[in-house]
Each structure stands twice: as structure tokens, then as C-alpha cells.
Image (cartoon, rainbow, N blue to C red):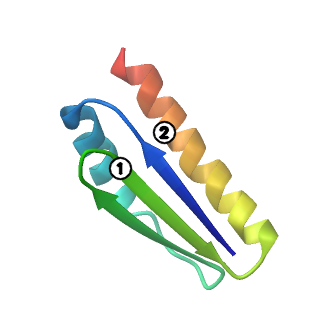
Amino acid sequence: MRATLHIKGDKEWLEALYVALKDQKESKRLKSTLTLHDTLEIVLEAKDSTALRAGLNTYLRIIQVAEKFKR
């Protein structure tokens, strides 16, 4: 199973977010790949829907917190 997130924002914020997310620990059930260009692309690959949901929730929560502190 796979999910891809495309995060838009100013370059400085995206770079800070990339640094914060790049060291997220991978597990046996979830692998993540981050790519930074004009957007931050996050690709999550999971062995099952439960792992994918948990990974999405984690990344989305971190992004939400980062957005809150951006202001």
C-alpha cells in the first residue's frame, strides 16, 4: 500500500519541515521517502492499511504542528 503527500509552502518552511521529518524512524511495516523540490513530497509505503494509516496520522500531525508554529 502506498500514499503520497505533496506539501506546498515557502522554501524556508519546507526545508525546516524536511529536516524535521527526514529522520523519522522507519519500521518493518512502514517505509518513507522524502523529496524536496518546489514542494515537499512524502511517499509512505506500508505492508498493510493499519500501518499506512498510522504513518499518515504521524506525518500529518507533525505537519500540522509545524504549520501552527510557522505563523
| Amino acid type at image mark 1 | Leu
Residue 40's tag is 1
* Closer to the camera in the image, 26 or 6: 6
Identify which residue is drawn at 67% across, 49% down: 57
As drawn, the label of residue 28 is none
Q: Position of residue 17 (x, y in %)?
A: 33, 43
Q: Residue at coordinates 49% horizontally, 65% vertically from top-left?
A: 43
Above or below 7: residue 35: below
Name the residue tied to disc 2.
63
Going 27% across and 33% down the picture, which residue do you hit? 13
Disc tally is: 2
Q: Residues within 10 Å of mark 2 (few under 14, many from 20)?
A: some
Q: In x, y percent, where is residue 22?
A: 34, 61
Place of residue 64 in the rendered image (x, y in percent of width and height, measured from the top left)? 53, 32
**What residue is shown at x 44% (from left), y 27% (from top)?**
67
Q: Secondary structure at mark 1?
A: strand
User: Is residue 60 shown left or right of residue 69?
Assistant: right
Q: Label 2 sits on what residue type?
A: Ile
The residue furthest left is 12
Q: Is residue 10 left or right of residue 66?
A: left
Q: Please state if 53 lies on the left or on the right of 35 as rendered.
A: right
In front: label 2 or label 1: 1
